Image: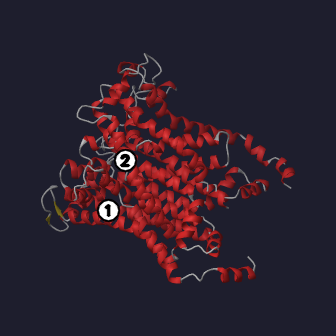
Amino acid sequence: MTADKVVLATAAAPRPPRRRARIFPIAVMAPALVLLLVLVAYPIAGSVRISLGTWDGIGAVAYHGLDNYRRLLRDSLVWESIGTSLQFFIGTVVFTVTFGCLLANAISRKVPGARIFKVVWFLPVIIPVSIAGIFWSNAFQPTTGVVNSLLGLIGLGDDHAWLASSSTALYAAIFVAVWTQTGYAMLILLGAMETIPEEVHEAATLDGVGAAGRLFRITLPNIVPMLGTITTLTSVFSFNAFGIIYAMTRGGPGNSTSILPVLVYKQSFVDQDYGYGSATAVITTLIVAVIGIMVMRIFRQQTLDAR
Amino acid sequence: MTAPRTQSGTRSAWRHGPLWYVGYALLLLWTVITVVPFVSMLLLSLHSTSDIYAHPLGLGGQWVLSNYADAWRGVVGGAPLSTYIINSVLVALCSLAIGVTCGSLAGYGLARATRGLSNAVSRVMVLALSVPLVVALIPTFELLGRYQMLNSVAGISLVYAAFMTPTIALIMRSVFAAVPRELLEAAKIDGYGELAALLRVVLPVSKGGFVSVTLLGLIFVWSEVQFGVVLLTRPQNRTLSVGLLSFQGQFVSDQGAFFAGLVIATFPIVILFLIFQRYVTSGITLGALK
């Protein structure tokens, strides 16, 4: 833009009221903030309140300070569940984001059949997670399940009791979580990848940069902000995966797949111990919030570098 | 300029290299893993239980349709599948109307606000987004109960709208941030105010973002189980994903009907997605704006 054009533009514009420019963003954010205040912040405060006492679901809360939290610290079930949740979280995020990125890259590089792949790979996302969980738990059954039947066909045996063994049940659950979320990550990342000008890729190709080189030197640096978003969303998803776990294993065998939301459900709705369940829910929230902020910090830092 | 160097061969060499074929084979493997459940549930829904146990891949035995009638009637003590489907549609429409409107407006605010304000509100959004649904469960049940909104479309829709809002806001922030600043400056030169610029200039070029967040919101609502179980206690008010949980236990001895139920629940939204897909494909590509 040349200098005289700038002058022209400034003169032609109706003097923008500076205050209005500042108020406008606040005004458009207000409805969302009200919604969040009433239906997210207020209930969280409610959970904190209930976590400070005993509640049977009907009467008043009998407060007794931090007793529930002291009990949590000594509860091996809670510690086990935190460990399970972290394993589930890391497995789900690493595989979902990596696969999503590779699949999106394949589509944006227009491999043969890319248009069909894009539709097919997104399909698992639209299945309700409860149905995905129900289906796969059936598919993982020994001898009668589809997974074992297919493994049997290629000579790997058809009698693996994936969900009945505490050493494999969590991996099966992570598999289903990744299965349901990868298409989502792919679609989001693809949107970012397609904003990269094709000429950049062409120029790199002409300079002899291979496919892997272009993925790491052109595509990834340009989609860092979206990588941050999708990593955050997938992390949160992994702590909300109640539906998958509940449909597949109900948290078992033993407690081997009891991620935190499942434990909270058991404490509250099975043991009717709402105060204790609320305390676990509050701890869960703190863990998730820390992870969310960490992820955003990491990626926001790189965002600034990239721009 | 390009023609001679392209033919010098890097590209074609890469295309036909062994690594490329390995990569492509992995893509095909992922495709199979993706498709297996859809094909499998369809095949198994067309067989009797004894055939399913004899032929777990669903390729042998007699082909029957009666499973669908059994599944449509639903389970004892539940509602018919049609009721669940209608409930899911109503809840999706209401919650999306609220959630997409509030979330997108907030996203635009985030994209346009000063850096300090934007960062502060973003942090609030990330926190709200980082909230595991389970932490709001019991107090929400208490709150909706107080206003007679349990077992109501309005009640659960408001809850779903609130929880999809941060996701939508953060995605739309990225979408709006990708709108070239020059476009907004041009709108100002043309005499548009903030709101007019948003409606007439920014919205048309951000259509794709709207379709995607709507789709993603729909997927969230269609899948959600935790709130559904607690806030929709009567079978006739349940959404599809919640209603189907009772299928699992009760159709253990009737595997054919069980899979037919999964097919009935899955394929309408698959078809819906295939219709939406065109919009997503053309829309999510912000690259069109360059």
* Quadrant where the N terminus of chain B is found in the figure: bottom right
The amino acid pointed to by label 2 is: Leu
What residue did someone put label 1 on? A39
* Secondary element at tag 2: helix
At 44% across and 71% down in the image, what residue appears?
B121
Rendered image quadrant of residue A139 = top left
Is residue A301 in sight in this rendering? no
Q: Position of residue B238 (x, y in %)?
A: 30, 43
Vertical arrangement, residue A158 with respect to residue A244, above or below = above
What residue did someone put label 2 on? B90
At 36% across and 51% down in the image, what residue appears?
A84
For residue A294, side relative to residue B203 (left or right): left
Whole-Å distance between the Cαs marked 1 and 2?
A: 20 Å
The amino acid pointed to by label 1 is: Leu
Colouring scheme applied when the structure was drawn: secondary structure
Q: Nearer the viewer, mark 1 or mark 2?
A: 2
Is residue B187 in sight in this rendering? yes
**B51 or B222: nearer the viewer:** B222
- Check disc 2: other Cα within 10 Å, few if <14, some if 14-19, many if 20+: some
* Quadrant where the C terminus of chain B is found in the figure: bottom right
Rendered image quadrant of residue B18 = top right
- Check disc 1: other Cα within 10 Å, few if <14, some if 14-19, many if 20+: many
Chain for mark 1? Answer: A
Chain for mark 2? Answer: B
At 45% across and 28% down in the image, what residue appears?
B42
Q: Position of residue A151 (x, y in %)?
A: 48, 29
